[in-house]
């Protein structure tokens, strides 16, 4: 028998402006009814039939969990976020579900709402609000069943990917995998692929990207198919297989590209620009990178493109343009608390100002420890090589050799 029967009886009685005496008359004592409404007593079938008759409902209707509708709405909301990726619909549903959550009894159901709210804020790239919800949910996994534990760890993985805390993200995704059981979730494979790629493990990233791609092709999810090809292309860049990278990017360009989402289009242009940059086609790189800036809808998404454009201006000696890009990048990074980009732009700023001593200290004390702790091997190697070069030019050969050796050991 449902644990919510007492609450439903009480709510229906109040809605019909009935007192306990009105409902109990001729059926049972008021004390007996009070115990039923407070879930302190299970009514007999005969009493329950009489109470339902007076309330004008069937016994089957009474047995329905009053939270069932709320839970169904949560699932619809999650689908709009994770499957359909429809921001407008997700926004509309959030307004309605937030109102429902204000009137839902029970700590568990409030935590369900908070769990899905975390996924909503990561979808909206609202890190500040996601951070708040994360602290509400922290260490609350014991509340959830296995299915919701799976979502709990997966959503925390997404949150930490967006925070650029990749080792933590990987820990949460691995915990989610423990609860995956027989579920074949392409999104989890896709998240693993992103994380391993950024941790400079292209081999593992490719395996997960291919698993995700296969499932997305079976589900005919065109956007995610494009995103998987983008990931495979990025991993090919990491492996220095530029031909394979270009093939993956070309597949996206030939797959109804004009209908491609702006977020994805911006990432494709960025990576085509990066490919040109690696092939020393600086003019081609600038063309694609500027296209990326034009189509990326959110300033937060522009940071990696601004960094690469700034590096190009540094190479070309265009100090005015470099300074402008640094200022713009730092402003966005500071506003969104993106530490990895604050570090990158600050290095470029100190280099531009020719503040050699400050730059060396900053690399040693801030930049290198950050990327080492976060497991970002490419970024770590680049900054170790840069520091080694600074020491070499300063004729401090012992220090230069030390950092050059550390960089080589990462290869």
Image (cartoon, rainbow, N blue to C red):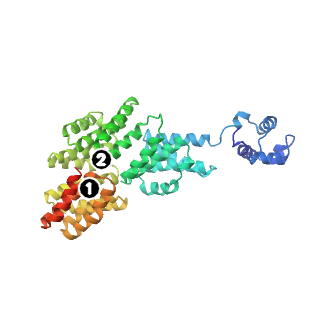
Residue at disc 1, secondary structure: helix
Image coordinates of residue 106 in percent, x first then y, are 63, 50
- Left or right of 35? Residue 337 is left
Residue at disc 2, secondary structure: helix
Image coordinates of residue 3 in percent, x first then y, are 69, 42
- Left or right of 133? Residue 327 is left
| Tag of residue 380 | 1
Judging depth in this view, the residue of 86 and 399 nearest the camera is 399
- Left or right of 360? Residue 142 is right
Q: At 26% from the left edge and 61% from the top edge, which residue is drawn?
A: 345
Residue 60: quarter of image: top right
Image coordinates of residue 154 in percent, x first then y, are 45, 45
Residue 2: quarter of image: top right
Q: Residues within 10 Å of mark 1 (few under 14, many from 20)?
A: many
Judging depth in this view, the residue of 26 and 159 nearest the camera is 159
Disc 1 or disc 2, which is closer to the eye? 1
Residue 321 visible in rendering: no
Sequence-first disc among 1 and 2: 2
Residue 104 visible in rendering: yes
Quadrant that contains the N terminus: top right
In this view, 212 is above or below 123? above
Cα distance between the residues tagged 1 and 2: 30 Å
Most distant residue in the top direction: 218
Q: At 30% from the left edge and 43% from the top edge, which residue is drawn?
A: 265
Q: Residues within 10 Å of mark 2 (few under 14, many from 20)?
A: some
| Tag of residue 295 | 2
């Amino acid at each position: 028998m449902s644990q919510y029967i007492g609450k439903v009886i009480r709510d229906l009685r109040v809605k019909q402006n009935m007192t306990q005496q009105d409902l109990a008359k001729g059926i049972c004592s008021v004390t007996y009814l009070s115990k039923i409404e407070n879930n302190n007593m299970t009514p007999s079938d005969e009493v329950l039939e009489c109470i339902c008759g007076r309330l004008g409902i069937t016994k089957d209707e009474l047995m329905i969990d009053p939270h069932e509708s709320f839970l169904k709405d949560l699932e619809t909301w999650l689908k709009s976020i994770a499957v359909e990726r429809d921001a407008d619909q997700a926004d509309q549903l959030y307004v309605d579900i937030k109102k429902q959550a204000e009137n839902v009894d029970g700590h568990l159901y409030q935590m369900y709402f908070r769990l899905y709210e975390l996924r909503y804020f990561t979808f909206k790239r609202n890190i500040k609000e996601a951070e708040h919800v994360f602290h509400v949910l922290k260490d609350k996994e014991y509340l959830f069943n296995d299915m919701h534990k799976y979502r709990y760890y997966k959503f925390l993985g997404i949150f930490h990917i967006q925070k650029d805390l990749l080792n933590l993200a990987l820990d949460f995704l691995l915990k989610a995998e423990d609860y995956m059981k027989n579920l074949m979730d392409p999104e989890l494979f896709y998240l693993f692929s992103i994380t391993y790629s950024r941790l400079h493990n292209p081999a593992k990233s490719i395996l997960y990207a291919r698993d995700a791609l296969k499932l997305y092709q079976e589900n005919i999810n065109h956007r995610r198919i494009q995103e998987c090809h983008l990931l495979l292309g990025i991993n090919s860049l990491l492996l220095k297989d530029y031909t394979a990278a270009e093939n993956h990017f070309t597949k996206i360009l030939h797959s109804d590209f004009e209908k491609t989402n702006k977020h994805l289009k911006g990432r494709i242009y960025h990576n085509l620009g990066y490919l040109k940059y690696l092939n020393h086609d600086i003019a081609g790189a600038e063309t694609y990178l500027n296209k990326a800036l034009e189509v990326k809808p959110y300033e937060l998404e522009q940071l990696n493109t601004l960094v690469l454009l700034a590096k190009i201006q540094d190479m070309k000696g265009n100090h005015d343009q470099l300074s402008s890009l640094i200022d713009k990048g730092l402003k966005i990074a500071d506003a969104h608390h993106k530490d990895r980009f604050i570090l990158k732009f600050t290095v470029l700023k100190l280099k531009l100002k020719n503040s050699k001593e400050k730059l060396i200290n900053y690399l040693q004390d801030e930049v290198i420890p950050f990327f080492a702790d976060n497991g970002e091997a490419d970024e770590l190697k680049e900054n170790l090589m840069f520091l080694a070069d600074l020491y070499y030019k300063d004729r401090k050969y012992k220090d230069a050799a030390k950092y050059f050796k550390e960089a080589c050991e990462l290869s």
